Image (cartoon, rainbow, N blue to C red):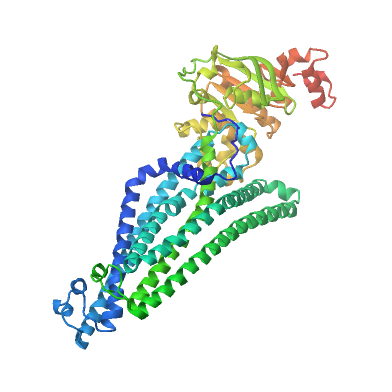
Amino acid sequence: MEVSTHRSALPATFGLPGVIRVFVRTWPYLKPQLLHILCWLVLQLTSYTAVGLVMVLVDDILNNKIMLGHPLEPAQATFLMVDPSFAEVEELSEEQRFVVRDRFVLFVVVGYFLNMVVLQLGFLHYYYTWIIQRINQRLRVTMVEKAEHLSLRYHSHARTGDAIYRVYQDSATITAIIDTAILDPINMIWKLALACLILWLFNPVLGLICIGATVPIVFVVAWYTPRLQRLARAARESNSNLTSRIQESFAAIRVIKANQAESTVMRRFDRDSNQALNAALRLRMEMILLWMIVLAIAGAAMYTADYLMAGWTVDEETTWLAGAITLVGFAVWNLGAFQQASGRVREYFDWGRGLINKWSLMQDMAVGLQRAYHLLDVEPDVTDPAEPVPVPMPIRELGYRGVDFAYEADQTVLDGVDLTARVGTVTAVVGATGSGKSTLMSLLLRLYDPVAGSVHINGVDIRDIGIEDLRGSIAIALQENVLFAATVADNIGYASHEATRGDIEAAARIACADEFIREMAEGYDTELGERGGKLSTGQRQRLSIARAIVRDTPILILDEPTASLDAETEQRLLANLSDWGRSRIVFLITHRLSTIRNADQIAFLTGGRIQEIGDHDTLMAIPDGRYRGFVVAETEGTPVDEVAP
């Protein structure tokens, strides 16, 4: 499926409903891991709840029993596995206090090791990493799959670095979403509720103070959220531009060095890098300002709570619901109760500030996910038919009928093109740069669809044929000879998974590449550098042609196939193609006269229209013909009789 170039404008801000919609879209990627997520969450919450309750018990044992010698509560005696008499005496003896101390230290050390080292840092940490990486992998694969099928219109407008940033960086926010927007908030809300419950049991006033401070904090965060979203979008767009600058610089490194443009490139990079840095710093600064406002409100609430608790401790007031509390101690306000409750107040606001920090990060993540999903949202403009028909075989004829095409509404590229190519012929498409030659071949591949008219194979409109089936019948060697860091054989057989070594070598012989390949250190098993950097331009060109030939398709398109070849190699290659193409339709897009004049027919394209068509002799015989003028101009005044074969 192809997609259109229409790029929906992404809103600068999108409010809470928009944030929720973006996060809800993660569901298809979360669903396969849902059971694992729930298992991890249950283990995490169970662990924290157990630790939280045990800490209340442990704090009382340390402060009141070991330090002051108060008798144990029955639950504490059971927990420490000591004699019930430890809970029946009026005061623990020195020997009993030492026993309690030793058991206490042993249980704390063992419990800490089991919870933190084995459970939290060991199993749960690994389990969590395994879950989120599987989710991220699924989204990235989906994005790359969609990006590979984007129309050339989209790629001609979009910067490659932007797509790379969306796939690599923006998509990574889905893993942070699991943590920051789902699991951590659930954890924190659970911990907030537990802390609030414990404070409520100490005294309901403490719970009301916490809730009372939470209300204005929520309003401040809601007011601040749109600004964070705008700055987050600016930061990600700046980083995307920086990624594009890096990609463009390394892709054009030869041109940069050849033109001594290193200083210019560095200035542009420095500018983009500083813009990205400043945008990121502005976002972080706003997050800090929000955090400071929240801290001021929380600080006022904490000091108010401490003031009240200090008074209750001095007066040794009874804690609320003392009967329930005495299961673990703190029936009255004392130093231990003050420390425990004060710690819970701070814990409540610490977790609250953490939750707000997560919310701030969620705005940046929502923007990142929205950018990532953009690659998945572009509407299609070239699609498979509802009921595709197969490519009619054997292919006898290919024709363009009244084809119009424009990339933009006011920029016509092809205008009423009519062209027929028959099996066993070589058709050269000739014209000035920008005349529409490559576009004509792109329509055959359905990289675009005509605005008007149609392209037919054996009379069947190619729009009625499945895209994969159609492209499986066409091989193309592009003017840009893209090779990969792999062996020579792998590069030739790249697009043909069923090709044998014999097929690969046969294709190389037709492309006049077999001789120089065998001269390499390991022949067809020689590893090429990145982008085929170890080869000359002519050698890369011949490997690209061999890659197209090995597919053994009934239609072959060669874009400037001999531009970098010497005259002798060019003639050998054209002779081989002529013999190989007797049962095929071959198109040549070229400017070289030596290549053109050997074609069975020449289509001369000017201003988006085929002005003349015929073989070399026929077109040269037209006194004021456009092709004749083209030949004379290309040969710089060489007499026409000398140009003709």
- In the image, taking residue 265 as reference, residue 370 lies left or right, namely left
Q: Is residue 502 above or below residue 163?
A: above
What x and y, as percent, mark residue 291?
53, 62
Quarter of the rendering containing residue 292: bottom right
Q: Is residue 421 left or right of residue 309?
A: right
Location of residue 415 (image quadrant): top right
**x and y, in percent, of residue 243 in the image:** 61, 49
Q: 534 left or right of 23?
A: right
Residue 263 in view of the camera: yes
Q: Is residue 412 left or right of residue 424?
A: right
In this picture, is 51 found above or below 635? below
Q: Is residue 337 above or below residue 289?
A: below
Relative to the observer, which residue lies in front, 411 or 511?
Answer: 411
For image coordinates 45% across by 54% down, the residue present is: 180
Q: Residue at x 65, y 30 (%)?
A: 561
Q: Is the C terminus in the top left, top right, bottom left or bottom right quadrant?
A: top right
Query: Which of these two is toward me, 573 or 130?
Result: 130
